[in-house]
Amino acid sequence: MSEMDSNNPYASPTANVAEPEGAAMGGLIENGRAVDSGRGSAWIGAGWEIFMKAPGMWVAITLIFFIGVLVVSAVPVLGGLAVNLLMPVFAAGLLLGCRKLEQGEPLEINQLFEGFKENVGQLVLVGVLYMVGIVVIIGVVFVIGGAGMFGMAFGGRAGGAAAVGMFLIALLIGMALMVPLAMAVWYAPALVVFHQQDAIPAIKQSFFGCLKNIVPFLIWSVIVFVMAIVATIPAGLGWLVLWPTMIGSLYVSYKEIFCA
């Protein structure tokens, strides 16, 4: 509004009304859409482009985040618990940072903490449900593996061989159960922060969105696995680039799968 208009008592009233977080993202596609399998590799490229919009700031944010995680994790029991509970909150802040860059706005250090400003309770609940899932999986592994150890104690040499087999089976089952758990929480923070979903519906939609795109996610995972090996070789310094690139690819894939 011009200065003349602001002094005009007959002018229509105006107000600066901020759009809700999800407004710029478009409508929500319930449970997501299936995309072309080739998008798995394209998401990595798109994530790299988001990183290159502010590479120095991304590296600084990632370094602060990693140091913070190491320091907090050093606290016995509670440290690791806090990291897992708050991870969706930090992820939400970084995803909001991706959108700011996409809209031509600058990325700042405090972006890491933007997730604490809105829907923080639902974001923390995503972390709680993730931890519950981890505890259940560990319980299943211990029950099956424990049965094998019991057989080894009372079954002699044959029981020992069976115990090793049961332990390996328990590990495989645990790894298999981690896949759907990861699918359930992968897009949950984005669904909470961009489309104001509650934690449980967000987890459900994240799972089905990933399930519909299992092939592109497999391609994405293979590429990221190779990149992770390369990133780890130089004293882990490559993760200062790979981590924000992964966040960028998460943001881009979310838009493609869930945004109308």
Image (cartoon, helix red, strand yellow):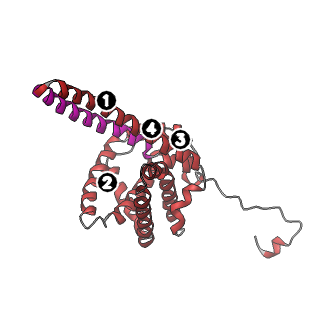
Q: Which residue is mark 2?
A: 41
> What residue range appears in magenta?
157-186
Instruction: Name the amino acid, label 2.
Output: Ser
213 left or right of 12 in image: left
Q: CA distance from mark 3 to mark 1?
A: 29 Å
Which residue appears at 52% of the width and 63% of the height?
A: 111
Query: Magenta residues: mostly which secondary structure?
Result: helix
Q: Earlier in the sequence, mark 2 or mark 1?
A: 2
Q: Which residue is mark 3?
A: 199
**Residue 210 percent coordinates (x, y):** 39, 41
- Is 162 above or below relative to 244? above
**Residue 82 percent coordinates (x, y):** 47, 51
Is 172 magenta? The answer is yes
Q: Which residue is mark 1?
A: 143
Q: Which residue is mark 4?
A: 132
Instruction: Name the amino acid, label 3.
Output: Ala
Q: CA distance from mark 1 to mark 4?
A: 16 Å
Q: Secondary structure at mark 4?
A: helix
